[in-house]
Amino acid sequence: MKQQRSLGFLGLSLTLSLAACTQMHSGPLPPQEVNVTLLALNDFHGNLEPTSFNAVQVPDPANPGKTKGLLAGGVEAIGGQLAEARAQNRNTIFVGGGDLIGASPVTSSLLRDEPSVIALSKLGMKVSALGNHEFDQGLKELLRMQNGGCDSNAPDKACKFEPNYPGASFKWLGANVVYKANGQTPFAPYFIETTPDGARIGFIGAVLKETPTIVSPSGVADLNFLDEAESINRYVPELQKQNVDAIVVLIHQGGEAKDKYDTVGCKTLTGDIVPIAKKIDPAVVAIISGHTH
């Protein structure tokens, strides 16, 4: 039997104290505290290089007296942040909120976004929600992006970055995406990550149910996109039976807030994610969203 654990999630300004309900025959063991750092990104959209972050203005050397957006992001910056976090806490998990690919700059899109998938894999991403843009090229191509190979509907772009595209080492999750024919999920609905110190974190993923209305209908003709909260809640008992120490939802759906971008604990969030979050099982300790950037 494993020891009872108390987990603290550090990162995203979220600290939680949890305990798994396992015990030895002689009685419950004292809690073994494990601090887990959960780092997430959403709507990466193949931005391998830094882009202009207009919320922060800096002097523009080319135009004295004027400002321009701060160049920020890109895989090198993300890699640096990840390396720093992992050096401080080996129980660091890197996850995504969807739209990792699609609507991408030419550095990624001209190579069918394979460079971005490979980069995120090398950065150690473990799992991500599906986003609507993952379906831009249809289900078959998305399955290739997950599993690898060169059988693409764009042979002029596929496997030009690497001769045999290996697929993503991380898992895209879609608890609410099912085949019309049999109700089965083409992508895993959930994933369990065990940290070096033995904490077991269950991740459930979902994408906005309106996805068929914002992508090419022919690419998702074989799929149904179900209610997000109902689909997520369906898998909570499964994870609990597997003695996970915490459950986290990754969902590609968002909202809007009037608060400044760096406000901690904003109070003005509205939009589609709010009623979904209210319906999600309270056993879920954190929700990572996306879509509205």
Image (tube, grey):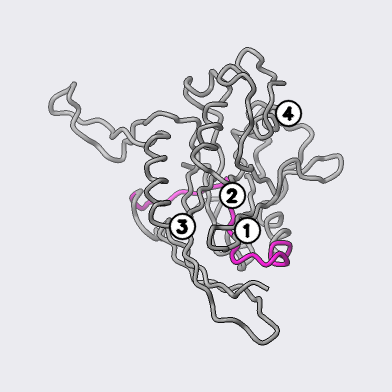
Query: Which residue is identified by label 2?
Result: 251
Hey, what amino acid is under mark 3?
Thr
Residue 185 placement, left or right of 8: right
Q: Residues within 10 Å of mark 3 (few under 14, many from 20)?
A: many
- Front-most of 78 and 210? 78
Secondary structure of residue under mark 3: strand
Of marks 4 and 3, the one in the foreground: 3
Q: Earlier in the sequence, mark 2 or mark 1?
A: 1
Q: Which mark is residue 292?
A: none
Disc 2, disc 1: CB below 8 Å?
A: no
Of marks 2 and 1, the one in the foreground: 1
Residue 173 position in % (x across, y down): 65, 46
Residue 131 position in % (x across, y down): 60, 39
At x 49%, y 57%, the residue is: 91
Hey, what amino acid is under mark 1?
Gly
Q: Earlier in the sequence, mark 2 or mark 3?
A: 3
Query: Which residue is identified by label 3?
Result: 37
Disc 2, disc 3: CB below 8 Å?
A: no
Q: Residues within 10 Å of mark 1 (few under 14, many from 20)?
A: many
User: Outermost residue, right direction?
Assistant: 181
